[in-house]
Amino acid sequence: MDQLQPVEIEEYIKGELLYTIFHNDVEHFSIAKVKILDTNLNYDEKEIVIKGYFSQLQEGTVYRFIGQLEKHPKYGQQYSVISYQTFIPDTKEGLIAYLASDMFYGIGKRTAKKVVDHLGESAVSSILNNPSVLDSVPGLKKEAANTIVKTLQENQGFEHVVVYLAKYNIGLKMAQKVYEQYKDETIELLEDDPYRLVFDVEGFGFHTADEIAKKNGLSLSSPNRIGAGCIYILQRSVQDGHAFLPLNQCLDEVSALLSNQEYVLTEDEIKSTIEKLNKEKNVILYKGKVYLPSLYYAEDGFASSVKRLISSQMDEATTLADLMKIIGKIEEEEILSYGKEQFAAIEQALKSKLMILTGGPGTGKTTVIKGIIKAYAAVHNLSVETADYEHKKDFPFVLAAPTGRAAKRLNESTGLPALTIHRLLGWNGSEGFEKNEHEPLNGKYLIIDEFSMVDIWLANNLFKAIPTDMQVLIVGDEDQLPSVGPGQVLTDLLENNHIPKVSLHEVYRQKEGSKIIQLAHSIKNDTCSVDSLTNDKDFSFIACREHQVVDVITKVFEKAMNKGLDVRDIQVLAPMYKSQAGITIINNALQALINPKGKGKREVRHHDTLFRIGDKVIQLVNQPEDHVYNGDIGEVVAIFRENENTENVEQLVVSFDEREVVYERKDYDNLMLAYCISIHKSQGSEFPIVILPVVSTYNRMLRKNLLYTAITRGQKSLIVCGEKQAFLRGIQTKDTNKRYTSLQEQLIERLGDVQVSSGDTVEEEYDISPYDFM
Ligand SMILES: Nc1ncnc2c1ncn2[C@@H]1O[C@H](COP(=O)(O)OP(=O)(O)OP(=O)(O)O)[C@@H](O)[C@H]1O
């Protein structure tokens, strides 16, 4: 017997808008109180709070809202609106009252009656279909007719778009974006060429455009469809870190996306569309590679900046003898003796416009950075005390890193001011960067740490803003995970022979007996075996299965709490969110243990997450206006109810170090519990104690660079829990997902004939010690 399909009945509320509780002009997000006139919901109250993205809501107007009931833990039922329409009265009296309402400026009852008497109960749809019907209304002034048409179009235009897109499961927020772009032409455009939205509206997906096109009977072979398919395939490749796709791969992927059993797209059709897109500058086709323009120009711009920097003239070089003396003096002050590689790094940095310093943990990168700063200051007769500079901008050393925590670490280890790269460049969100080639950075010596995290877009913007007379030191570890964004800038730079680089290999921290460092280097050098996993004072491996991971981690925390340790010093890192040993489950278990529900302890629920005062949380996106960036970790310090602040909205306050940031409900998506965070999010940060679960369920994710990144986050102690075999398999698995980038070629093209002004790349052995000159 055939099963009966459930019939979906659309739930609605017809109601009069009483008053707006909150409205955000930028996002068009509103919360309002509505008097219910009619509904098919199982809801007995006479009024309800609605929320959603609206262009404009008029008090006193009746709307028909479609959405769903949500239960707010404190405020009870609220209606989250997916789509809405002004309710146009269907009686003559109602219609007259509607047209005579405040919404229609200057239209009184008499004029409204004239219109309704002449055009009948369907007056509104008649006017919207053909505004000239108003010309036939006896005695209606032109000005009044214009007001009626304009008001109806303004209100109904957006609502039509909302209703139209809701059929394709597109919510109010995207509908707003689409409407802002095309206004009254939106529906026409959606019906004639929905693929244009893939180009014009950020975040509008190809599949939605395809669905709209199919419903409207548009041809599967239209060039617009093929073009949008190409853009979609390139956008998808960027998410995998590629800067371009080889033409053949692009053809294959577009064909697989667009062809089906009835319709097969030929290679020539796709190729000629790509050529057309290239002519229109919607993609760049260059030497058999297909790029999104922003990536082509980022690689091109970055390579040009590198050439500009390294081919510019250096100041008169200091003699080796003078440098030896200077470094010798620094060694005395620092009470250490630089190793050969370290010495070479300081010397090379001083005589290079651009140099790369690489090395694993504990090889002395920070020690060398401090040495370079002191030596540069001595050679140029400068002070390294910020207090000696009246204007902050005159301070000669500029230090930056890709994340807030990495910048903080750089500041703590050098004692000098350090910023995030975004902050250094004055990023204002949609307006872009304040600093650029026309408004360059101030300072003489720039140091960028954790460069492996910098993607090609940011690298281009950063290098554009570097003035030609500035010297630059790039610091990084190429074995860490690559940048989240596209490109592999550090790896590509290291491949180029014209760019001076020094790699530190000797491990100094190991001498202090650190097992974490030993383990890191054995992974880096592919010598790690089961013997490397024996317990030591700063390392332990707790064997357990996937279903025991949460239990083991909670036990470790319990023990730490009993010992009086600060649990904020312990960070759990895991590779994935789902699974019995995933981030979500670990977070919930640790929240229940460390920060349980308590009498009077406020909490708010957001989807499946409960945020409670005292919770450790992580910021998931850059929010430059509040100086809080992706990966910053903070603590929920307050939760305010609607009636407790002047904005009349619920607020959650998070403290990030000394800075407090206020979040409203629409921003809660930017936060997540952070007792356990992903290894990707931990890049650039270090924590006193790291707990790392590794089980075979993570297999898909377990790679050498991922595990290397995770274990090098631990400063004092590392606890790995799980399966040794899964760990060993993981560190033997190299990341074979090759990123397509053409930066190396771009650099060779430009630097092939460049005379690097500093001299050669350092590769020779240094047998001289500073003491030879003292
Ligand atoms: N030449 C040296 N002589 C003695 N000790 C050194 C020397 N170089 C570095 N060290 C010591 O080794 C330890 C690690 O050095 P440093 O912090 O500079 O390394 P790093 O590469 O920046 O490490 P990480 O990447 O883990 O932060 C420090 O305690 C430092 O004082």
Image (cartoon, grey):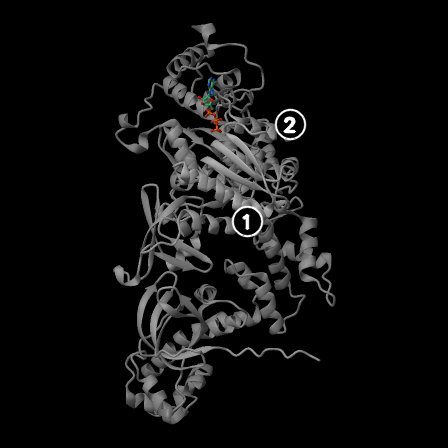
Q: Amino acid at mark 2?
A: Thr
Which residue is rendered at x = 43% and y = 53% of the image? 670
Q: Which of marks 2 and 1 precedes in the sequence?
A: 2
Say few, some or many: other residues with alpha carbon within 10 Å of mark 1 (under 14 / 14 to 19 / 20 or more): many
Say few, some or many: other residues with alpha carbon within 10 Å of mark 2 (under 14 / 14 to 19 / 20 or more): few
Q: How far across and down, in percent of the image, does residue 163 sit?
A: 48, 74
Residue under numbered circle 2: 527
Q: Give the numbered dot on residue 582.
A: 1
The vertical placement of 643 against 445, above or below, is below
Which residue is rendered at x = 45% and y = 83% of the image? 130
Splitting the image into 4 quarters, where does residue 424 fall?
top left
Tell me the element at label 2.
loop
The vertical placement of 744 against 610, above or below, is above
Q: Nearer the viewer, mark 1 or mark 2?
A: 1
Instruction: For marks 1 and 2, give the CA distance.
Output: 29 Å
Is residue 761 among the parts visible in the rendering?
yes
The vertical placement of 550 against 322, above or below, is below
Q: Is residue 359 left or right of residue 76?
A: right
Q: How far across and down, in percent of the image, does residue 211 sit?
A: 60, 68
**Does label 2 point to a residue whose CB lies under 8 Å from ligand 1?**
no
Q: How far across and down, in percent of the image, does residue 85 sit?
A: 43, 77
Q: Amino acid at mark 1?
A: Gly
